[in-house]
Image (cartoon, grey):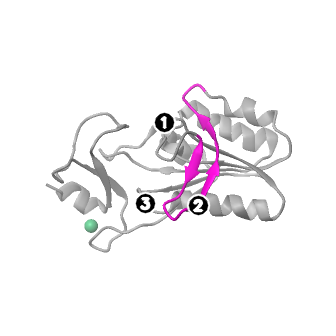
Amino acid sequence: MASLYFYYSAMNAGKTTSLLQTDHNYFERGMNTILFTCAMDDRYGQGTIASRIGLKKQAVTFDKNFDFFCYVKDAKKVACILIDEAQFLTAEQVNQLGDIVDLLDIPVLAYGLRTDFMGNLFEGSARLLAIADILTELKTVCFCGKKATMNLRVDKDGKKVTSGAQIEIGGNDRYISVCRKHFKNHP
Ligand SMILES: [Zn+2]
């Protein structure tokens, strides 16, 4: 029986490395996978999933109108579906992933951020937390040593950014993974 998995974390917890390692494990057994990533994330070139430790792999890109069920049902001999940047899925797309598991009996592993820089759930993550069979938190640490669960957005002066678009493209802000206490207290 296939399952829908959601691996979630703050930024820089190794989600992409974990995804690419899992993909490699299928490859070594001669099994086919399909990798998906969000069309917005072009840090490493359109349609490439790359981890910070140097691994990379081509992927199919999705936007808000992409139909996962239609794409996968016509594919041949797929052993596993792997999705990077799963926080950017719509709720409807997460439902499609559930259909892939239930109707096509193909396991789906989705990797994404739990919350945005304001501490709110992303749409895709909210739906995955609601309907995934198996939830796994990938852990990283705050500078204080506690588990980092939040994504702090800071401007060029290191000051906390508290408003703006959920997804910022091409700006100068950067993100720091922190615990809840330091997310609230950051100046
Ligand atoms: Zn902390």
Pick out the residue farthest to the top.
65
Q: Residues within 10 Å of mark 3 (few under 14, many from 20)?
A: many
Q: Is residue 163 above or below residue 31?
A: above
Quadrant in which the C terminus is drawn: bottom left
Q: Earlier in the sequence, mark 1 or mark 3?
A: 3
Q: Nearer the viewer, residue 101 or 49?
A: 49
Q: Which residue is mark 1?
A: 40
Q: Secondary structure at mark 3?
A: loop
Q: Please report contact status of discs 3 and 2: CB closer than 8 Å, yes or no.
A: no
Residue at position x 24%, y 62% from top?
181
Query: Please, what is the three-letter code of the amino acid marked with disc 3?
Result: Asn
Q: Earlier in the sequence, mark 3 or mark 2?
A: 3
Q: What's the distance in space between the residues labelled 3 and 2, CA to CA?
A: 15 Å
Image quarter for residue 47?
Answer: top right
Q: Residues within 10 Å of mark 1 (few under 14, many from 20)?
A: some
Residue at position x 85%, y 41% from top?
76
Q: What's the distance in space between the residues labelled 1 and 2, CA to CA?
A: 20 Å
Q: Earlier in the sequence, mark 1 or mark 2?
A: 1
Image quarter for residue 25?
Answer: bottom right
- Of circles 1 and 3, the one toward us is 1
- Image position of 186 (left or right of 101): left
Q: Please report contact status of discs 1 and 3: CB closer than 8 Å, yes or no.
A: no
- Rendered image: mark on residue 12: 3
Q: Which range of residues does the magenta coloring cover?
A: 47-65
Residue at position x 41%, y 57% from top?
10
Query: Please, what is the three-letter code of the amino acid marked with disc 1?
Result: Met
Q: Secondary structure at mark 1?
A: loop
Q: What's the distance in space between the residues labelled 1 and 3, CA to CA?
A: 18 Å
Residue at position x 45%, y 66% from top?
139
Q: Which residue is mark 2?
A: 55
Ligand 1 is in which quadrant of the figure?
A: bottom left
